[in-house]
Image: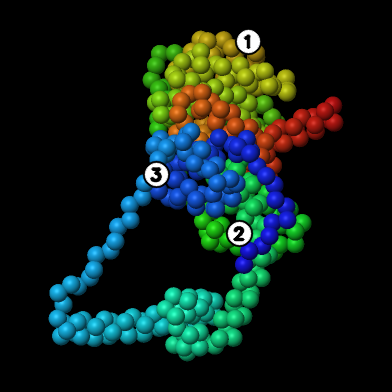
Amino acid sequence: MTIPNKHYVKRTQRDYTLGFKLQVVDAIEKGDMTYKQAQSIYGIQGRSTVLTWLRKHGKLDWTTSSRKNTMPKSPRANETPAQKIKRLEQELEDERLRCLLLNRVVDILDAEHGMSLRKKYIAKGARSLQKERKVSLSKACSLLDISRQCVYQREKREATRQAELAPVRGMVLELRRFMPRLGTRKLYFLLKPKLIAKGIKLGRDALFNYLREERLLVKPKRSYTKTTNSRHWMKKHPNLLKEVVPSKPEEVLVSDITYVQSSEGVHYLSLVTDAFSRKIMGYEVSNEMKASDVVKALDMTLKTRCYRHATIHHSDRGLQYCSSLYQEKLKKHGIIPSMTDGYDCYQNALAERVNGILKQEFLLTQCKGLNELKTLVEESIYTYNEMRPHLSLGMDTPNKMHEKSQQLALLAY
């Protein structure tokens, strides 16, 4: 059943972020889907839009396409009539036992778990059997021990539900254009006001099932690489966060370095994050982990600060953070340094978590070079700060939490 879209909005190439384009290109080149399936799944407009992305950002040659159709080989060539009869008798017996076993399993599931499989799924199988093998619906229902009325009622309910949920796909794809790997709980939080406004009844668990059926669930990714060298002669500072819990923005800043890859090789992303609001205050993408590169992220943070109270800067014991260049910059602006005790990632867990969010939800595919990577990082951090809700912030965005605290401070003053 096709539902006409009354709110059709024409999009251009600029309406799709670089991160979204790279994700689609990567999925197609891995063989997860064809470019036509990608256009259908993500609702991408234009016949050649995805092909344009493949030719611009893909690693394969998409200037020409060729497909080879292979014909299946004919089975059991040189089979005598007696052998054929014996084989068919054995297949018939195996099929009888298989049907008996499947029916017994269905009865057990219905009895023990109340799943109503016969009404919910076997009715669908009867209709499928009618279409594929050209068996009448009456005969199919008789074989499956269900009534035709059951099939008609199920189809009517399914068509009504599909019509009700038709706008949900567009809502999901609109958010996924900016946050392609946003978790379902956060996705449901952002969708809930829109669902209520349209009168659509859809709970969080039902949204999981809907995304699974529409092939829109995201799969978790895990990766880990060590980028810290804490064995050096430079001065190290004690861990002040053992006794300090941030209660306002810019009271504690956490920093870390993570690696990101492009077709040109490995690059490094330096981040400075506010521990209270989870807002990324400064960042820098570079080809090396020099202190002069890492300090640029701190410079960006100092330019965007909104408060002037005492601040602690927490990091690991890497060479870059212990360098005189970095420490002099902190001292000049009255920021107190704090470091982990040795190489313990759990003592800088918040910074590690922000690294993970960016790499697992935004920086998903390899860019062609450093310039393209910088554009992707800029887009990703903007979306993270402005659009992505956090469970730890009561589903507020980092920037909203940062500004909310600033407004409360002004009112108190």
**The residue tagged with tag 1: helix, strand or loop?**
helix
Near mark 2 (Cα within 10 A), the count class, few <14, some 14-19 or many ≥20, is some
Check the image and report above or below for 219 versus 231: below
Q: Nearer the viewer, mark 3 or mark 1?
A: 3
Residue at point 51%, 35% (across, down): 363
Sooner in the amino-acid sequence: mark 3 or mark 1: 3
Distance from label 3 to label 1 (Cα)?
60 Å
Distance from label 3 to label 2 (Cα)?
37 Å
Compared across the picture, whether 215 is left or right of 98 comes to right
In this figure, which residue is indicated by the disc labeled 1? 332
Check the image and report above or below for 207 versus 75: above
Residue 281 image position (x, y, % from top left) = 63, 26
Compared across the picture, whether 172 is left or right of 224 comes to right
Residue at point 60%, 24% (across, down): 282
**The residue tagged with tag 2: helix, strand or loop?**
helix
Q: Nearer the viewer, mark 3 or mark 2?
A: 3
Near mark 1 (Cα within 10 A), the count class, few <14, some 14-19 or many ≥20, is few
**The residue tagged with tag 3: helix, strand or loop?**
loop
Disc 3 marks which amino acid?
Answer: Ser
Residue at point 75%, 59% (across, down): 198
In the picture, which quadrant includes the C terminus?
A: top right
Q: Nearer the viewer, mark 1 or mark 2?
A: 2
Check the image and report above or below for 105 versus 22: below
> Does the CB distance between marks 3 and 2 fall below 8 Å?
no
Rendered image: mark on residue 65: 3
Viewer-proximal residue among 56 and 377: 56
Sooner in the amino-acid sequence: mark 1 or mark 2: 2
Check the image and report above or below for 275 versus 117: above
Residue at point 77%, 30% (across, down): 406
Rendered image: mark on residue 207: 2
